[in-house]
């Protein structure tokens, strides 16, 4: 009991779980809110993540990009560097029948931040990155008509990494925009190769029959149009495959929202330095 009280005073949330899955995570959100109750499943194969969580209980953690000691997810200097890669005109363009909205260009500090989030045990970076996505989105899309579906990972890959970065970004994005989120709207049925290694034709083949509609949408298709959400947009192969899967079941798909788009994905608009 004393341990629990002490942890709560530090702003840490305790969650009910089976004995082998009981753990603690830092909560940067007000107690009792939706975000305060969100947590990420512990992953024994990701020691960097667990170490970050443990050190965060007692110390200011180093900025994952520059290693300066700081109390936030990213130091102010690195935040400014990432913001330089924000698209100067945050707006959507069309990929066939899909609208595409990108927050920034996949380069420099933003590319480094995405790598730190995905591969270096820093899932907490999804909060600030997802929030920035939401703020830009609201500036051009004040309407809340839609439901957000994060691009799913194959269960084996999610177990290995410990989380799905698209899902984490979507949670923070939806907290700001107030759009509903359907985490299980799509399923990833087949493990696929990393898309960046493949040619355009190989990407399409790689994603063939990779997705299926999730049980919640099979039972009750959404009345609102779907916005897919992912971390990186390259050629649109992932978005097109996911959208096709949903549309085959009569589900409307408006487009995809991404944190960053590569040079290959910049079909219109331009990401320029904001500072």
Image (cartoon, rainbow, N blue to C red):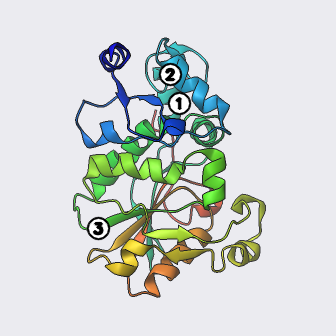
Mark 1–mark 3 Cα distance, whole angstroms, equals: 32 Å
Residue at 58% across / 37% down in the picture? 113
32 and 1: which one is in front?
A: 1
Point out the frontmost of discs 2 and 3: 3
Residue 245 shown left or right of residue 191 in the figure: left
Say which quadrant the N terminus sits in: top left
Percent x, y for residue 157? 65, 55
Q: Earlier in the sequence, mark 1 or mark 3?
A: 1
Q: Quadrant of residue 211?
A: bottom right
271 and 24: which one is in front?
A: 24
Residue 77: which disc? 2
Q: Earlier in the sequence, mark 2 or mark 3?
A: 2
Secondary structure, mark 1, is helix
Point out the frontmost of discs 1 and 3: 3
Residue linked to disc 1: 81
Mark 2–mark 3 Cα distance, whole angstroms, equals: 35 Å
């Amino acid at each position: 009991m004393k341990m629990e009280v002490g942890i709560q005073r530090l702003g840490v949330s305790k969650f009910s779980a089976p004995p082998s899955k009981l753990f603690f995570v830092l909560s940067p959100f007000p107690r009792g809110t939706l975000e305060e109750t969100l947590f990420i499943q512990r992953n024994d194969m990701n020691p960097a993540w667990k170490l970050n969580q443990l050190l965060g209980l007692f110390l200011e953690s180093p900025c994952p990009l520059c290693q300066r000691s700081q109390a936030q997810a990213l130091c102010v200097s690195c935040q400014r560097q990432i913001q330089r890669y924000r698209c100067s005109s945050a707006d959507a363009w069309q990929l066939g029948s899909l609208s595409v909205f990108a927050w920034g260009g996949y380069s420099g500090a933003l590319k480094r931040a995405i790598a730190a989030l995905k591969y270096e045990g820093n899932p907490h970076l999804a909060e600030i990155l997802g929030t920035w996505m939401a703020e830009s989105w609201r500036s051009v899309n004040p309407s809340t008509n839609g439901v957000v579906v994060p691009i799913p990972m194959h269960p084996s890959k999610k177990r290995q990494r410990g989380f799905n970065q698209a899902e984490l970004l979507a949670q923070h994005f939806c907290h700001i925009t107030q759009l509903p989120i359907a985490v299980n709207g799509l399923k990833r049925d087949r493990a696929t190769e990393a898309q960046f290694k493949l040619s355009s034709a190989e990407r399409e083949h790689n994603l063939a029959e990779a997705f299926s509609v999730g049980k919640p949408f099979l039972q009750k298709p959404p009345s609102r149009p779907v916005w897919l959400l992912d971390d990186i947009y390259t050629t649109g192969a992932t978005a097109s495959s996911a959208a096709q899967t949903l549309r085959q079941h009569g589900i409307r798909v408006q487009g995809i929202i991404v944190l960053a788009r590569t040079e290959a994905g910049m079909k219109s608009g331009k990401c320029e330095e904001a500072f």
